Image: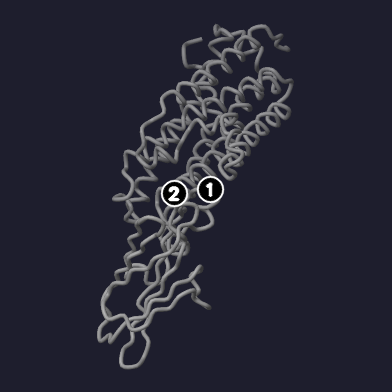
Amino acid sequence: MKLGRTMLMELRCSWRGYLIFTLVVVLILAGMVEIFPSVSEAWQHELDGAENIDIVTVMEGDLAVIELTWVEHPGADNYTVMVGNSPYMIVPMDRVDGIEGRTYTYQAPPEDGTPPELYFSVSAMVDGERKFVGAESTMERLNPLEETLGLDYGDIRGFMSVIWGMWFVLLIGLYIALAAVNSVSRDFEEGRMDILLSQPVSRRQYMLEKFSLVALVTMVLLVISGVVSVASVNAVGELETISASAILLTTILSWPLFLVIIAFSVLMAVYLDNSKKALGITFLFVLVQYGIHLVGDMAEALEYVKPFSVISYWNHDSLLHGEAVAWGDTVFLLVLAIAFVLSALYIFERRDVPA
């Protein structure tokens, strides 16, 4: 049998499924990026009027010296600064009235050698009526996702990282696992394997072409996803924040991760007796790897478990922020995928094929 014939036969049987799944991925991906402006606004975590106040904090001896500067309010007679431990200022720690200028210096003892977390509210007195100017804090405020996962939904890079890490990997990983298992198991269960191998095709060629087809289809899907992501990010006006090359590189460098999933799926399809068992083990593999990675991200104390998940070797968050590619991690994923493929070949070449 000519080289590539097995791949073409498999493609004829599966192209509709691949096409439909690609369209689903494209629609979901484009739709999620398009809602970024709304999500970003909803997760806005700056204090009201924070843009009107600048804070500079320096340590001078045993005191933290905090200098506030705010924008001038039209018609202001003087200003009032309130200081508190929370942004609500129900009962402020300090209150200073009658400030003539637009600056004020506040001193406070440090906490564990670092400036204390304090909140400042500035208001202007205009014709006997108090007008709010703004509020600001000495500490950078984080939304709940930043505190737990280190992700900022208000930044397109953080938003894309969530899409990649929490949705993209799981959805595509489970689908290609299904496709890889079925591509081999279907030939066993439908009684075609003995006919296929009676043709001038070696077991090695058969297995490598089955693996290669799913791998190539996955690469095509990733390239399309990368292009759609760039177009969607450009449509919401965020290409100044994140470069098109960073998006494309991040997407394409997920391929070694998916190769590991494909190779493991093929190995299970060859090793186990039927597709249900193989699919169950493969899905469990993907979900466990995903769970380990997620737990390692969410709990700093459990970060040590992340190296046990293959997903952690594709650092999409760093890539989206323009950091250097960790080629060592990429090579590790490729070596692991090759190891699974070689194991599948070893088992398949020694397995009896039922007539």
- Of residue 262 and residue 50, the one placed in the foreground of this image is 50
Q: Quadrant of the C terminus?
A: top right
- Of residue 26 and residue 257, the one placed in the foreground of this image is 257
User: Which amino acid does the dot numbered 2 rest on?
Assistant: Gly
On screen, residue 193 versus residue 42, left or right, reads: right
Name the residue rendered at 33%, 46% in the picture: 242
Count neighbours of disc 1 (C-alpha within 10 A) and say few if under 14, some if 14 to 19, many if 20 or more. Answer: some
The residue that label 1 is drawn on is 149
Name the residue rendered at 47%, 64% in the picture: 42
**Is 72 above or below relative to 276?**
below
Count neighbours of disc 2 (C-alpha within 10 A) and say few if under 14, some if 14 to 19, many if 20 or more. Answer: some
Q: Position of residue 250 (x, y in %)?
A: 40, 36
Name the residue rendered at 36%, 36% in the picture: 323
User: Which amino acid does the dot numbered 1 rest on?
Assistant: Leu
Quarter holding residue 36 = bottom left
- Of residue 201 and residue 345, the one placed in the foreground of this image is 345
Rendered image: mark on residue 158: 2
Name the residue rendered at 71%, 23% in the picture: 189
Helix, strand, or loop for circle 1?
helix
Quarter holding residue 52 = bottom left
